[in-house]
Amino acid sequence: MSTLIKNCLKKKNPIWLMRQAGRYLPEYQLIRRKQKNFINFCLNINAATKVTLQPINRFDLDAAIIFSDILIIPYGLGQQVEFKENIGPVLSNYNLDVFKKKTKYEFIEKIKNVYKAINKTRSKLSKRKSLIGFVGSPWTILVYVLNGKSPKKQITYKKILKNKEEIKELFQIIEKFVLIHAEEQIKAGADTIQLFDSWAGLINSRDLKEFCFNPTKRIIKKLKQKYPKIPIICFPRGIGKKIKEFCKVVKPNVLSIDSKIGADFVLKNINKKIIIQGGMDPKFLLKGGKLMKQKALYYLNKFKNRSYIFNLGHGVIKETKPEAVQQLVNIVREFNERSFRKN
């Protein structure tokens, strides 16, 4: 069992943050300026290891999350992926024949440096700290593959409806390699896996089972068969109250909630066996201060009687001040100390 989960079960409220290793840190920017191509940056073993460890060294967080990107999967499958300033990711048109011919060995060989970076990070990381690997969920990867860029607020179903058989085949390939990528990260030293379904909120209600619930359930089932001690965190962002059904179908170890989900709804509807993570809107972290403290304490108090990992409802925003992150860590640690003394 990962130390992240052990601390949860002891009601210690461990803290880590999505996108904690990244652009808001000045030490990250120093490395980033030397790395012109973002995918190559993710595949640079030394650079990825250094960046992964930066927030641990600065804030003493309870878990590191490997510096990588969910779009490593389409890249590994043979689709061109480029990150453009002020635009975001831009992907070339996919070629189904290329995807179909891609072998497990070829995929792993192309992105093997991700696994080497995990292995190197694990060797440098304290045993008291968890190392989180991650993958994009099949739907979210499919959205990028089809759309060629970030969908932002909506996606047309025209491409999905136009050729259902091709999309079904494409989706199956993506699901297969999502599982492979997760497994290889575990083999390399990740003791926890997070599944990011960042665009789950774009799925029509009638399609949630097909594109979100069932594929996630299948992936977790297969991972658990091979690695029963590895906890799986699921982040089906934007599905609202459908998380109740999601949890009944998928049965994740940890449910990461976005900021639009009410804490009271979670407490009432989500099985207590499932650990809760996250919730606080990243915008409250931007500058820190009294309002951030108020929001952080809100979640800590709401979930004080169940296992809880403090995190955000999404990733750290680029303009966030590192001092605000330190303040947040102090708030969580002080809350834990007070709770420990009471008990």
Image (cartoon, rainbow, N blue to C red):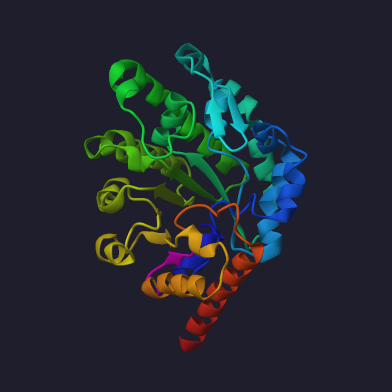
Q: Position of residue 8 (x, y in %)?
A: 47, 66
Residue at the extreme left? 206
Quarter of the figure with the C terminus = bottom left
**Residue 219, picture quadrant:** top left
Q: Which residues are magenta?
A: 304-310
- Residue 300: x and y in percent read 44, 72
Q: Is residue 73 left or right of residue 258?
A: right
**Residue 79 sits in which quadrant?**
top right
Q: Which residue is most to the front?
A: 86
| Residue 20, placed above or below residue 14 | above
Residue at 52% from the left image edge and 27% from the top image edge? 74
Q: Residue 232 vs residue 127: left or right?
A: left
Q: Is residue 309 rendered magenta in the image?
A: yes
> In the rendered image of this protein, does residue 312 appear above or below residue 181?
below
**Residue 217 visible in the picture:** no
Residue 88 against residue 316 in the figure, above or below:
above
Q: Quadrant of residue 285?
A: bottom right
In the displayed structure, would residue 289 be above or below residue 137?
A: below
Q: Residue at x 64, y 37 (%)?
A: 114
Residue 95 in sight? yes
At 77% from the left and 48% from the top, the residue drawn is 30
Outermost top residue: 97
